[in-house]
Amino acid sequence: MAYSEKVVDHYENPRNVGSFDKGDDSVGTGMVGAPACGDVMKLQIKVNPQTGVIEDARFKTYGCGSAIASSSLVTEWVKGKTLDEAAAVKNSEIAQELALPPVKIHCSILAEDAIKAAVLDYKTKRMAAAAVA
Ligand code: FES
Ligand code: FES
């Protein structure tokens, strides 16, 4: 199957590969798997606790080229966004930007699920911290 130029670009030069310390208070971690193919994606955000703006993002994806490209793209998109803006990123926007064919749509859904999970993880952590304080 032919990948689009943008997929190949993100696949060959993935942005923001790596990870942050999960225990860091300012970090949210989203880990999701695709039952269809067994691929796994971990996406992390680093948030400024004062402003609630995402300052940095990292990912590690064990999966196909489209999954890697989708997660790479999302880490770029969410930088500078608020938590709510980041959680509103749609898989259809990812699929459109990368020109994903229908059989690869689930790869972009994985990225949407991962960023939502990362935002939720960060919010849950902050609420737990507030409850203790
Ligand atoms: Fe993972 Fe295609 S290689 S779903
Ligand atoms: Fe399953 Fe891409 S994540 S084929």
Image (cartoon, grey):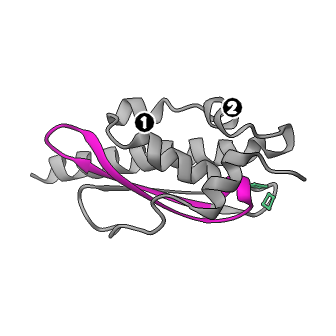
Left or right side of 25 for 38:
right
Q: How many marks?
A: 2
Q: Closer to the camera, 83 or 56?
A: 56
Q: Would the CB of label 2 be found within 8 Å of ligand 2? A: no
Mark closer to the observer (1, 2): 2
Q: Which residues are magenta?
A: 41-68
Above-or-below relation of 114 to 95 = below
What residue do we see at 40% from left, 44% from top? 119
What residue do we see at 72% from left, 47% from top? 5
Q: Residue furthest right?
A: 1
Residue 131: x, y in percent?
17, 47
Above-or-below relation of 18 to 110 = below
Residue located beneath label 2 in the image = 96
Q: Are marks 1 and 2 in contact (CB under 8 Å)?
A: no
Residue located beneath label 1 in the image = 86
* Res 34 quadrant in image: bottom right
Residue 100 visible in the shown view: yes
Main SS of the magenta segment?
Answer: strand
Residue kind at label 1, given as amino acid type: Ala
Residue 93: x, y in percent?
62, 30
Residue 122: x, y in percent?
33, 49
* Res 113 quadrant in image: top right
Q: CA distance from mark 1 to mark 2?
A: 17 Å
Residue 33 visible in the shown view: no
Above-or-below relation of 122 to 25 = above
Left or right side of 59 for 12:
right
Determine if the magenta segment contains residue 131.
Answer: no
Residue 108: x, y in percent?
67, 43
- The circle on residue 95 is none
Quadrant for ligand 2 reads bottom right
Q: Would the CB of label 1 be found within 8 Å of ligand 2? A: no
